[in-house]
Image: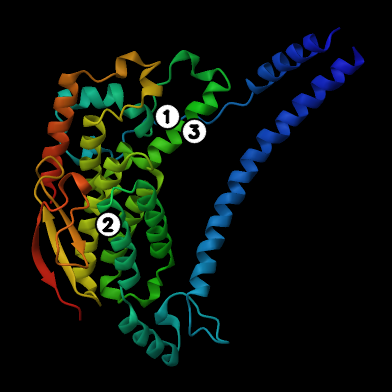
Amino acid sequence: MTIKKKIILGLAVVLIAIQFFQPLRNQAVEVPATHIERVYAVPQNVKAILVQSCYDCHSNNTHYPWYSRIQPGAWYMAEHIKKGKEELNFSEFGDYSVRRQRNKFRAMAGQVKDGEMPLSSYTLIHRNAVLSPEDKQVLIAWFSTMEDSIK
Amino acid sequence: MKNLTLSIIAVTMAFITVSCNQVSNKNEQSSNDTSDVSQEQTVSQPNGGDTIAAPGVSETPNGQQTTATEQEKKFSIAPIVTDYLSLKNALVSDNDKAAASAGKKLLATLNKVDLKAIPADKHKQYMEIADDAKEHAEHINENVGNIHHQREHLASLGEDLKDLIDLFGTSQTLYQDHCPMFNDGKGAVWFSENKEIKNPYYGSKMLTCGKVEKTINSK
């Protein structure tokens, strides 16, 4: 048996082994009272976009695709979601101070406008999360109205 | 073949150890964080002496309470203002790297603030402002290469600083300036140590755009 074969076999074993280490899933059954949809009236069209393009990483409830259990991708995804929720969590939006909410609305509008969000690494796989120019308009307009309304 | 089995076992073991370590590292990290906080709190007790300062002023004997009131008078946002100004000046000169390090410094300053020195009636408001300001300082630090994003956070910081000045006053004369264009024409505020307009939101592109809204005298 050559060294090369050993290495390949070793890697295969590692790959199989890590499948047994699955990160905790980011899923919640209930919509908490602090969820943005329970704190503010979110229009249907806005909500549809948020669900499609934002909640996977910015809420306590991720819609996982089938391949999300394949390691090491699952770790990568879990890290991503953790970071995303630290920055902005729609499920806990009601817990933010008014100041923070206002700034979040402003930041969201800016991020969408600049094309920073949704992340390109996310839309690469989730093609349906890509925001159309119309989607962007809808979001920016609503975020902007919300920013002004909670002064 | 024996070698192979051995190496497979070794690799798997190594992997398991690593992944387990990761988990425990995380735990350690978070416990370290809390110990940092408590350390800071103890360090930031200048009059601690030999008495062990207990959190919660109300429980301490009379002697301690007087020192607490003395501290209240001493609370000043001057270090925060200083760091804000150097951050603002970095953005005036379009320097994203300098802005990032100024953001880091501001974050450190905010983390060092002796919360016990803040008057009780202003405590909650201060905490809200500081939490927000920390987030902006952190983002400015993380966004070398994206000066536009740094400037967006400066705009929010400007509002935080405005509220801090309203609450606690300033020990140096400051000029509150207004840029009408920033944030999609909603405008943004900034503070300067000089009367001359130097716009941090557009830098060299529109350096003299904006106007002084008011002069805040030191007190």
Point out the frontmost of discs 3 and 2: 2
Which quadrant, please, contains the N terminus of chain A?
top right
Q: In this picture, is B78 found above or below B8?
A: below
* Proximity of marks 3 and 2: CB atoms separated by less than 8 Å: no
Q: Marks 1 and 3, how far apart in space? A: 15 Å
Marks 1 and 3 share the same chain: yes
Amino acid marked by disc 3: Glu
Q: Is residue B67 left or right of residue B121?
A: right
The type of residue carrying mark 2 is Lys
Report how far apart the C-alphas of labels 1 and 2 lie in the structure.
Answer: 41 Å
The residue drawn where x is 22% and y is 22% is: A48
Q: Amino acid at mark 1?
A: Gln
Q: Which residue is mark 1?
A: A27
- Residue labelled with disc 2: B88
Q: Residues within 10 Å of mark 2 (few under 14, many from 20)?
A: many
Color scheme of the displayed model: rainbow
